[in-house]
């Protein structure tokens, strides 16, 4: 791409050009521009003009094309500049140096859209005016606008590919990579079906001028009509023959900057556009992808241009606002954007959704699905789509998912989806055949764990993995008895209910069998030994010591100890720092093995470490992995030492039909890649610390918050009726979670009293999401709970 250096004429030169070429006596002041040099000229009578001195590389035929376009549309649109000929009759003159071409245009009053107070009426008017401009340009053509132009969205992917490595911030590069991948999958196939015409291609918020406009009315009501409308669309320097809808995409891309709900703002622009120039099916489907592409393109070209011209502030004029909005846009599924756009234009959206009424689905489910399979929330949700940290209901409403840790790298993460789809089309079979994906996945999983954890078994769920872990422990030790923690949950099979006090001591439970021994949960808030007690870890470990002594006295051998490294169902608990090391040592001395259930906590969620046990400087003998490693695809894994694996190899084959199948391995590998490539562990730490601080601050202001704890994106907020008695505020916790759901933020409760709010979002959950969560949390405490 050629870098055009804007000319450097002085004000006097502009004044004399105005006099000599146009016979005008004016004053001159500078106007901003990316490639040309623009001057505002003003006569003594107050008449204003724009003198444009083109950069030396600008070609005459292209300037002629611009002029012809402006002349072509003049009868239909009053809000674009017109060309003022020189005394000689020419519309394009040469500056005395001969290197630069000079033109004079009428001046349009108004303030840049970027500086205007946004309103729905104004955004719709923007859409209407761009549509009128497109309709007027539709009949125009010129050979010079059929050009290979870096701002043409038809070249977007190519230009982004070339310049994105120049972007200094890694997180912005990753976001752009994510959005371009989505574009390739989602929008690019639609491009051949998009109509093409001459388009303005640069209705950015500095090229759109806003002023009083009596024709603007907010036809939909609900928004105060400020009487402001679009009174100018200037700068035809990016004129190109391309997708007509790209004009709308460009206008919407800049109009949504700094808006709290960018999709709603874009939908308003689209709605205005649609009233004048109805969008077709493909244009609706491509619009959001093109909006994102334009902003990504802008960041890439700015990075390139800033290298060439580091002192030019105009080049970075929108860059901060674009950087702020990219994470939000990256998180929106293009298909949901399409639905929003169609809704805003009053069109049917149900074709893309599940149209069945919720009540019907609920009634049918009650007959078909066992009642013990519970629904969340007093008013159940009918979720029909997911994308990254967002879920969408059957009406297209978006929910911030703040507690589902299964879609670890984000609901329907495009790379994970693609990996699964591609492998599914090639081969899906089991571990009885050699396949490199199986070895590769096992190798990569084991590499995340410390020595000597190096032998892998792949299964399909956390339950299946814990079952196997138990068999390994028993095979290795020759004993049956197990030590578990109070309130623990390890899975849904008969044996796992036996080792899950949360279940066997809860409603419908029948208590533990004789081979299960329950130790106190080292809960520094609600347990016997509190956070203030520096000996708490040792004291809780003594509970395990006592159990071992009892077993010893009864001459019963110990198979092992199982615990989540940070118990989740138990109430989002973080152990005293020295607890696990003490317990592991006691268990090993007694001949048992130590099993770490990392089903909830694994793969970077806690921010500081990849696996939660690492936070306590211990190495288990068996590690159980589940939920997050498959990002929603059913994968479980057990990783152990070569010795334990050898003990289990006693002649009986172990076979899990679907465990380690080819598709699962491809998906598991994609998840590991995304965690690394998107820096999700460090992200979890940064966002988690930010949220933790905001929640601590809430605790200082609201007595109902007894404790705030956790690590990374594994957090708990414990509600109490009184901080003195720490009586659990179970009812309030339930109310809070249901009110948060009404504010479209999804949380759940945990802990033996269901009074701990669990926060375990998909890892792309970002700072803006964290702020939204803590602000809404505060609002619900105040407005709904009166606390
Ligand atoms: N271990 C823990 C700690 C869990 O939380 C769960 C599920 N909630 C399981 C094991 C069982 O996993 P799954 O539901 O995949 O069988």
Image (cartoon, rainbow, N blue to C red):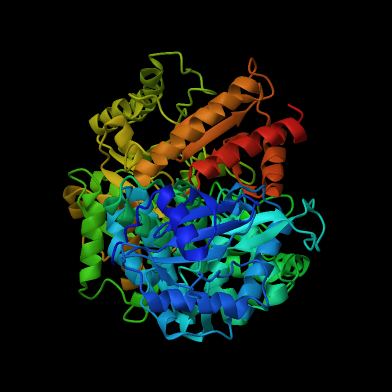
Quarter holding the N terminus?
A: bottom left
* In the foreground, 779 or 579: 779
Q: Name the image quarter holding residue 646.
A: bottom left
Residue beneath the point at 35% across and 39% down = 612
* In the foreground, 757 or 11: 11
Residue 429 in view here: yes
Residue 496: image location, x then y, percent: 46, 49
Residue 744's place in the image compared with 217, above or below, is above
Residue 681: image location, x then y, percent: 35, 44
- Taking the image as shown, residue 388 lies to the left or right of residue 505, namely left
Q: Name the image quarter holding residue 138.
A: bottom right
Residue beneath the point at 45% across and 81% down = 189
Residue 615's place in the image compared with 459, above or below, is above
- Taking the image as shown, residue 477 lies to the left or right of residue 259, namely left
Residue 283: image location, x then y, percent: 57, 77
* In the foreground, 501 or 766: 766
Quarter holding the C terminus?
A: top right
Residue 672 in view here: no
Residue beneath the point at 67% across and 73% down = 77
């Amino acid at each position: 791409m050629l870098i055009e250096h804007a000319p450097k004429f002085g004000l006097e030169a502009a004044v004399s050009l105005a006099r000599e070429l146009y016979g005008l006596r004016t004053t001159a002041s500078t106007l901003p521009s990316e490639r040309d040099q623009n001057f505002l000229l003003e006569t003594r009578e107050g008449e204003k003009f724009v003198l444009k001195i083109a950069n030396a590389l600008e070609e005459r035929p292209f300037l002629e094309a611009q002029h012809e376009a402006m002349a072509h549309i003049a009868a239909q649109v009053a809000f674009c500049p017109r060309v003022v000929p020189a005394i000689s009759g020419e519309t394009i003159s040469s500056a005395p140096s001969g290197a630069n071409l000079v033109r004079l245009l009428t001046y349009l009053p108004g303030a840049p859209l970027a500086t205007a107070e946004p309103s729905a009426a104004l955004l719709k008017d923007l859409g209407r005016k761009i549509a009128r401009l497109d309709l007027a340009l539709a009949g125009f053509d010129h050979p010079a606008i059929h050009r290979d132009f870096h701002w043409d969205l038809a070249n977007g992917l190519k230009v982004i590919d070339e310049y994105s490595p120049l972007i200094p911030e890694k997180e912005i590069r990753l976001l752009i990579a994510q959005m371009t991948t989505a574009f390739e999958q989602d929008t690019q196939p639609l491009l051949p079906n998009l109509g093409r015409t001459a388009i303005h291609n640069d209705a950015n918020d500095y090229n759109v001028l806003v002023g009083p406009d009596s024709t603007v009315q907010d036809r939909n009501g609900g928004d105060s009509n400020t009487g402001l409308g679009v009174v100018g669309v200037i700068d035809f320097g990016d004129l190109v023959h391309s997708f007509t809808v790209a004009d709308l995409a460009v206008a919407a891309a800049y109009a949504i900057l700094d808006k709290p709900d960018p999709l709603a703002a874009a939908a308003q622009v689209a709605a205005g556009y649609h009233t004048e120039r109805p969008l077709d099916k493909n244009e609706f489907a491509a619009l959001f992808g093109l909006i994102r592409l334009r902003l990504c393109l802008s960041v890439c070209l700015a990075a390139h241009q800033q290298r060439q011209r580091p002192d030019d502030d105009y080049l970075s004029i929108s860059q901060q606002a674009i950087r702020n909005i990219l994470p939000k846009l990256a998180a929106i599924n293009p298909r949901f954007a399409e639905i929003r756009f169609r809704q805003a234009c009053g069109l049917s959206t149900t074709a893309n959704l599940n149209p069945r009424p919720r009540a019907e689905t609920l009634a049918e489910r009650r007959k078909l699905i066992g009642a013990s399979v519970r629904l969340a929330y007093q008013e159940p949700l009918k979720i029909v789509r997911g994308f990254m940290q967002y879920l969408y209901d059957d009406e297209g409403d978006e929910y911030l998912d703040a507690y589902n840790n299964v879609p670890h790298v984000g609901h329907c993460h495009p790379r994970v989806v693609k990996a699964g789809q591609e492998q599914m089309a090639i081969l899906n079979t089991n571990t009885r055949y050699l396949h490199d994906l199986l070895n590769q996945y096992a190798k990569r999983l084991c590499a995340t764990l410390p020595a000597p954890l190096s032998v892998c078994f792949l299964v399909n769920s956390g339950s299946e993995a814990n079952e196997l872990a138990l068999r390994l422990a028993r095979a290795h030790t020759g004993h049956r008895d197990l030590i578990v923690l109070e309130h623990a949950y390890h899975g849904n099979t008969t044996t796992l209910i036996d080792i899950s006090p949360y279940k066997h001591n809860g409603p419908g439970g029948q208590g533990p069998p004789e081979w299960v021994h329950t130790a106190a949960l080292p809960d520094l808030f609600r347990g016997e030994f509190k956070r203030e007690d520096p000996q708490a870890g040792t004291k809780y470990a003594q509970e395990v010591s006592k159990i071992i002594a009892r077993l010893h006295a009864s001459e019963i051998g110990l198979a092992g100890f199982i615990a989540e490294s940070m118990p989740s169902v138990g109430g989002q608990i973080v152990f005293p720092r020295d607890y696990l090391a003490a317990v592991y040592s006691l268990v090993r001395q007694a001949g048992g093995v130590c099993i770490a259930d990392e089903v909830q906590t694994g793969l970077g969620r806690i921010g500081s470490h990849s696996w939660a046990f690492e936070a306590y400087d211990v190495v288990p003998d068996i590690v159980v992995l589940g939920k997050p490693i498959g990002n929603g695809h059913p994968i479980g894994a057990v990783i152990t030492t070569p010795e334990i694996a050898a003990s289990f190899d006693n002649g009986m084959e172990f076979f899990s039909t679907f465990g380690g199948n080819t598709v699962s391995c491809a998906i598991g590998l994609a998840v590991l890649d995304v965690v690394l490539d998107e820096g999700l562990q460090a992200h979890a730490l940064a966002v988690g610390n930010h949220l933790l601080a905001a929640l601590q601050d809430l605790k200082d202001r609201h007595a109902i918050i007894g404790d705030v704890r956790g690590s990374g994106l594994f957090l708990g907020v414990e509600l109490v009726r009184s901080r003195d008695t720490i009586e659990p505020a179970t009812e309030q916790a339930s109310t809070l979670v249901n009110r948060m759901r009404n504010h479209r933020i999804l949380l759940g409760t945990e802990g033996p009293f269901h009074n701990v709010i669990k926060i375990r979002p998909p890892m792309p959950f970002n700072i803006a999401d964290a702020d939204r969560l803590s602000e809404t949390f505060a609002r619900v405490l105040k407005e709904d709970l009166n606390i």
